[in-house]
Image (spheres, rainbow, N blue to C red):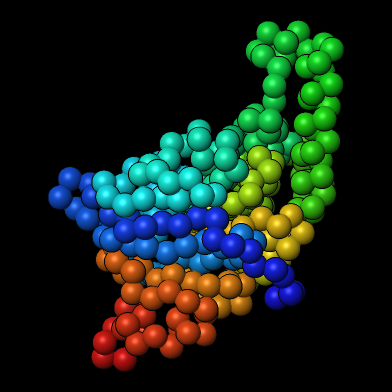
Amino acid sequence: MAERTIGPVILDLRNISLSFGGVKALTDISFDVREHEVRAIIGPNGAGKSSMLNVINGVYHPQHGEIVFHGRTRQRMNRHEAAEQGIARTFQNIALFKGMSVLDNLMTGRLLKMKCNFVQQAIYWGAAQREEIAQRAKVEEIIEFLEIQHIRKTPVGRLPYGLQKRVELGRALAAEPSMLLLDEPMAGMNVEEKQDMCRFILDVNEQYGTTIVLIEHDMGVVMDISDRVVVLDYGRKIGDGPPDEVKNNPEVIAAYLGSGH
């Protein structure tokens, strides 16, 4: 990875516990995220990784623990507040508007940046027209950055899986997040598609200065692009540190390979 400056802690999760009925999804988990770093969350299926991302961006509200984001402490964060404060998210299952073009999907990521009301937008004159032109210019920058100019007018539903994943990344980037949460951004991709996605994630981190928190099952990818890794197993934290340290942690090895190995 290129040399980058990792900043101070901007997100601190303290003793987070989350239950659904009698089922414990997360138990007393603490870790932090530093500005500009790539922070990976790994673990076997059912470890609580997606639940943790959902806590960070306000989809789930923990029963115990605190979330400190940019120095502000709270027990919970709601989704709209998270978006307004610069947290964007992609999902395991692609959540795009399949009948809309790539360009229009990316424009939905600019909604929080638009100031004109519905009536002004409907008339499409004056301030509303100027605003849409400015927002489209931002989206065109992202289209060029992600190298998807050739599909900008194509309905998303017609695109292969790997390109749909890239469009979803673009929609998240359209919100100009300071922190980007990626839930298995390379799931289901072939080797070439994974290489492309790795490159774009690192470019987002380095060129935009965006802090990245990602869940990923491909350990080669995790070890190559992450600054630090936190490991969950059955809703508990079993490892946390630089990639080399984590991959040699006996508890982590046991969780992935079984104690017999």
- The picture places residue 212, in percent across and down from the top left corner, at 59, 59
Instruction: Say if residue 206 shows up in the picture.
Output: yes
Closer to the camera, 2 or 215? 2
- The picture places residue 52, in percent across and down from the top left corner, at 39, 55
Considering every residue shown, the one lying at the far bottom of the view is 261
Quarter of the view holding residue 200? bottom right
Q: Is residue 152 above or below residue 133?
A: below
- The picture places residue 154, in percent across and down from the top left corner, at 73, 39
Task: Tell me the residue at 69%/65% (across/down).
Answer: 202
Pick the quarter of the image with the C terminus: bottom left
Task: Tell me the residue at 47%/37% (across/down).
Answer: 79
- The picture places residue 91, in percent across and down from the top left corner, at 50, 49
Closer to the camera, 25 or 28? 28
Instruction: Say if residue 26 shows up in the picture.
Output: no
Task: Tell me the residue at 49%/72% (across/down).
Answer: 229
Task: Tell me the residue at 59%/51% (across/down).
Answer: 179
Q: Is residue 59 above or below residue 6?
A: above
Considering every residue shown, the one lying at the far left of the view is 22
Q: Is residue 43 above or below residue 138?
A: below
Closer to the camera, 108 or 14? 14
Pick the quarter of the image with the N terminus: bottom right
Quarter of the view holding residue 232? bottom left
Count of marks, rendered view = 0
Name the side, left or right, on which 22 lies relative to 163. left
